[in-house]
Image (cartoon, rainbow, N blue to C red):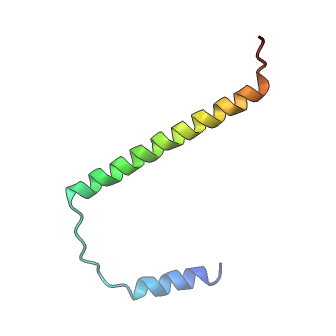
Amino acid sequence: MRIVFPAIAFSAAFTLPAYAYLDPGTGSMVLQAIIGAIAVGGAAVSVYWNKFKSLFTTRKK
């Protein structure tokens, strides 16, 4: 922890401006990535929740 703060302060002192441009399409792409990650996370939770539930339920024939 003693090295982290001086390293951050040192790197922040010697940074140069990036002069970057983010067009409106970039925000749309980021939003799509967030929505996709939420959808994949929900599908994964659903699959594993059903597997977990099946451990405790018995099926009668």
Q: Establish if 40 lies above or below 8.
A: above
Residue appearing at x 46%, y 40% in the figure: 39
The quadrant in which the N terminus is found is bottom right
Residue closer to the observer: 8 or 45: 45
Residue 24, given in percent of the width and then of the height, sits at: 21, 56
Q: Is residue 9 above or below residue 33?
A: below
Q: Position of residue 8 (x, y in %)?
A: 51, 81
Q: Residue at horizontal 78%, vertical 12%?
A: 60
Image position of 54 (left or right of 28): right
Q: Is residue 46 above or below residue 58?
A: below
The residue located at (59%, 80%) in the rendering is: 4
In-image side of 39 versus 49 (left or right): left
Count of labels shown?
0
Task: Determine whether, in the image, residue 7 is placed left or right of residue 31.
Answer: right
Q: Nearer the viewer, residue 27 or 4?
A: 27
Residue lying farthest to the front in this orientation: 61
Relative to 13, 28 lies left or right: left
- The C terminus - image quarter: top right
Q: Where in the figure is residue 59, as x and y percent of width and height?
A: 76, 16
- Residue at screen point 23% across, 55% down: 25
Q: Position of residue 54 (x, y in %)?
A: 72, 27
Q: Quadrant of residue 23?
A: bottom left
Front-lying residue, 55 or 29: 55
Give above or below for 46 relative to 30: above
